[in-house]
Amino acid sequence: MFQSLPGPAKALIRRFYFMLFRGSPAPDRLLYAIDEPRGQRPLRAIRGRCVLRGWAVLKDRVDPPRVRIKVNRALYPVRVMARADVREAFHRSPPYAEACGFELALQLNRGAHLIRVEVELHPGVWRALSTTLFLSLGLRQPLPQRVDYAAWTDLAAAWRPLERREFEAHLPLMTARPRFEVFVEAARGGDSEATRASLAAQIYPDLEIHDLAEGETPPPARDGTGYRMFLRAGDRLAEDALYAFADRINADPALDVLHGDEDLIDADGVGREPFFKPDWSPTYLAAANYLGRAAAFSNRLGYAGPADRLRLVRAVGPDGARVASIPRVLLHRPADDAEGLLADAGRVATETSPPPAAGDAQPRVLLVVRGRGSGRPPPPTDYPFVEIVHEVRPSAKTVAPAPPAPWLGGLADRHDVLVFVDEDLTGASPAWIEALVAPLADGAVAAVGPVLVDRATGMRHVGLTNDDGEPAPIRVETAGVAPLVPRNVLGVSRACLATRVDDFIAVGGFVDGLGPDLEGLDYCLKLARRGRLIAHTPGAELSMARWRAPRPEAVTWHQQTWPESCARDPYYREDALTTRPATHRVAMKLSNP
């Protein structure tokens, strides 16, 4: 029937087909469509399972190209499908092969995921389609709907038998079988039998156990391809801990550090005080041993324990490509080790502020007070090397790069650090500038933000996240061990932000029209793209009248500009307790431009 139609009708049908199935001719020789998911229709998934379907052809080829799908950092081959409808719509002589369709069933964890479909244009040359799928298994829920930790652990326990069967079935299929050396250090009052029982119950069986006296250093590694763990008597390793590590190593054999979450467990086996950890956070690790004992280290590093953590920071580097975070509670510490867990989370490290640099070694600060031109003075400070300028905050809502500020010339040249603060912020201690500037002594840190307290609600904001694709403040939660040391965050609000002058100039400053949160987040992401780190410090605390959510247009601009960060915020874990019963159907949001 299609062949009997006149030429203009065929062209019209082809055009309609492209419009209907979102086909794209860019580049000119590539035609494709993502059939499922489509448009803005919400997806629904049970336990995170969803299906992607589509097709791709090259105009100058009879055989369809190979297709693969990248989910975050992992690549997946797809199942080839016959598509007679595509062959009919693009009928030629010789006709396109029917097997131009592809399908992939995904099992996604809770969180946000960036999915790209890649087509092989030439042998070994892959190109990502312009259509990007942003799938988010919604985490953010109103606080009253959150599940407390006891209910969360009960739900995990209910799923454990099913998961164990799945994991055991996967063991024979693993191509890599890493060997784990587990060193168990004696501890006063520690129950070494409980530790050994948890190791004997491991799903993944390839491990060696070594006992160490208290304070003893482990011997040098014999197997350069193996991994080491450092436990204390009384620790109980979750039965899937070594399996979780081995599974990630199979996906990426270059991983050098793997770590999971921890909690405390009482005599009745009830867990409490969970410590949900961020991904690789060098600023945090330099201040506290946040990796804790639910961690495995490659023997390639020569890592000998917590005393080596600064050496570990230098060996791994700032980007964390060789570090994997397992978002599961993999270690239960005995209840009498509460102080140890708090210390590893960094609670003890913040009882004293970092010592200030002496004399002229302290950086010179240009304090930029932004407001409506009222000339209101900034929060009082006792910092000795500071000069104050006032800047009128732009009222335009159009998103555009900010014009060069008048002070960016001569004034900025005489200073090392810029500190931006909105004139309506109050309540800071006189040492707030000193606390903001201190983390910048680490050459890898390029921007620092404080704790912002919302006076209307009492919420304490400790940086910005893109979790679930929704840029918003990270709020201090009551559940779990909240770190109080300077730690990495995805971004900090422009309402109060410290950064070096040369970094500010290098990335072109702020973008106006986004609001303080998104302006700060956009600026921090530009720094991160250059390999720099962003830190939050609890030593500076200021209060605001009321936090206001960004405008929807600004959020849309941000999601389109920074899709990768919307898909994965490596530093945000405070929402880990948000969950639903196993039979709950999880709605997924979709961005398919």
Image (tube, helix red, strand yellow):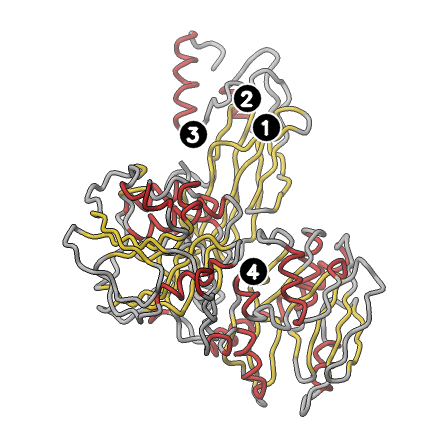
Disc 1 and disc 4 in contact, CB within 8 angstroms: no
Who's the residue at 33% across and 53% down the image? 366
Closer to viewer: mark 1 or mark 2: 1
Mark nearer the viewer, 2 or 3:
3
Give the CA distance from mark 1 to mark 4.
45 Å
Camera-side residue of 329 and 380:
380
Instruction: Report the residue that reaches farthest toward the bottom.
Output: 189
Q: Nearer the viewer, mark 4 or mark 2?
A: 4
- The answer to whether marks 2 and 3 mark residues whose Cβ atoms lie closer than 8 Å is no
Badge 4 is on which residue? Answer: 282
The residue indicated by pointer 2 is: 87
Q: Are marks 1 and 2 in contact (CB under 8 Å)?
A: yes
- Tag 1 residue: 100
Q: CA distance from mark 2 to mark 3?
A: 17 Å
Q: Which residue is mark 3?
A: 22
Q: Going from the N terminus, do you reach mark 2 or mark 3 first?
A: 3
Which amino acid does the dot numbered 2 rest on? Arg
Name the outermost residue toward the front: 359
* Image position of 544 with respect to 176: above or below: below
Amino acid at pointer 4: Pro
Distance from the alpha carbon under mark 1 to that under mark 2 = 9 Å
* Residue 166 visible in the displayed image: no
Q: Residue at x 35, y 46 (%)?
A: 412
